[in-house]
Every structure is written in structure tokens, then in C-alpha cells.
Image: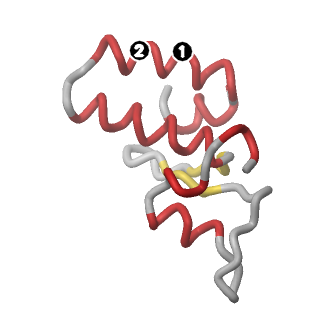
Amino acid sequence: MTNNVAWWNLPIEELEQMADDKGNIKLNTKIKATNPYSGESAMLTPEEHKLYIEIKEHERDEEYNEMQKKLSKFSRMNASAYMTLLD
């Protein structure tokens, strides 16, 4: 799996997005994520998408210290997507 993400650890929704018409997982795929406030979208690697979901969960749970750590990591991984989805 790209970026050391094990496919078996991904939610079924992500696996469905990564699969072709025959159900085969495409390893070099991108997953579309949409900013719930602006409606703008960005294409993320599976690793980036997993981190994005974790950030949004920390935000929902008001775990701001953990959220900030992951925001910092995400901004270094994909600055453009950070500006679109999280800034």
C-alpha cells in the first residue's frame, strides 16, 4: 500500500472509493475530501485522507491539542489541500 497505509485498516467507505468496477483496490488512488464549510474539494492520498478524518474527529470531540498536532502534520504533507480543507 502506498505511504505505509494498510488497506485493512481503512473504513469501508474509503475502500469502496479505492476500488475499480470489479472490486479490485487501486493502490495509487486519490480520495476526494470536501470542506464542509466552503464546499471546496481536494484529492488526497489514503494516508492524507486518514489524517483528515482524524483531524475532523478531534475537532468534533473538542480535542484541540491533538487536532493541532495533526493539523501541523497535514499542512507539511499537503499544503494545498490544507488550505482548501482545513485553513
For mark 2, does the 10 Å Cα neighbourhood hold few (<14), some (14 to 19), or many (20 or more) residues?
some
- Tell me the residue that label 2 is attached to: 68
Q: Which residue sits furthest left?
A: 61
For mark 1, does the 10 Å Cα neighbourhood hold few (<14), some (14 to 19), or many (20 or more) residues?
few
- Tell me the residue that label 1 is attached to: 72
Is 64 placed left or right of 22 in the picture?
left
| On screen, residue 9 above or below 50 | below
Residue at image point 59% right, 68% down: 17
| On screen, residue 69 above or below 30 | above
Of the pair 48 and 26, the residue shown nearer to us: 26
Q: Which residue sits furthest bottom?
A: 22
Residue 11 is situated, as x and y percent measured from the top left of the image, at 44, 58
Residue 9 is situated, as x and y percent measured from the top left of the image, at 49, 51
Is 64 placed left or right of 84 in the picture?
left
Instruction: Estimate the spatial distance between the alpha carbons at disc 2 and disc 1, rounded to whole Å.
Output: 6 Å
Instruction: Find numbered disc 1 in the image and state the secondary structure of the residue it sits on.
Output: helix
Q: Which residue sits furthest right?
A: 28
Residue at image point 70% right, 55% down: 30
Total marks in image: 2
Of the pair 19 and 42, the residue shown nearer to us: 19
| On screen, residue 47 above or below 33 | above
Of the pair 28 and 79, the residue shown nearer to us: 28
Name the quadrant containing residue 38.
top left
Q: Amino acid at mark 1?
A: Ser
Instruction: Find numbered disc 2 in the image and state the secondary structure of the residue it sits on.
Output: helix
Residue at image point 73% right, 50% down: 1
Name the quadrant containing residue 29.
bottom right
Residue at image point 30% right, 29% down: 58
Asked if the residues shown at circle 2 and circle 1 are in contact, with their CB atoms under 8 angstroms apart, the answer is yes
Residue 5 is situated, as x and y percent measured from the top left of the image, at 63, 43
Q: Amino acid at mark 2?
A: Gln
In the picture, the disc for residue 25 is none
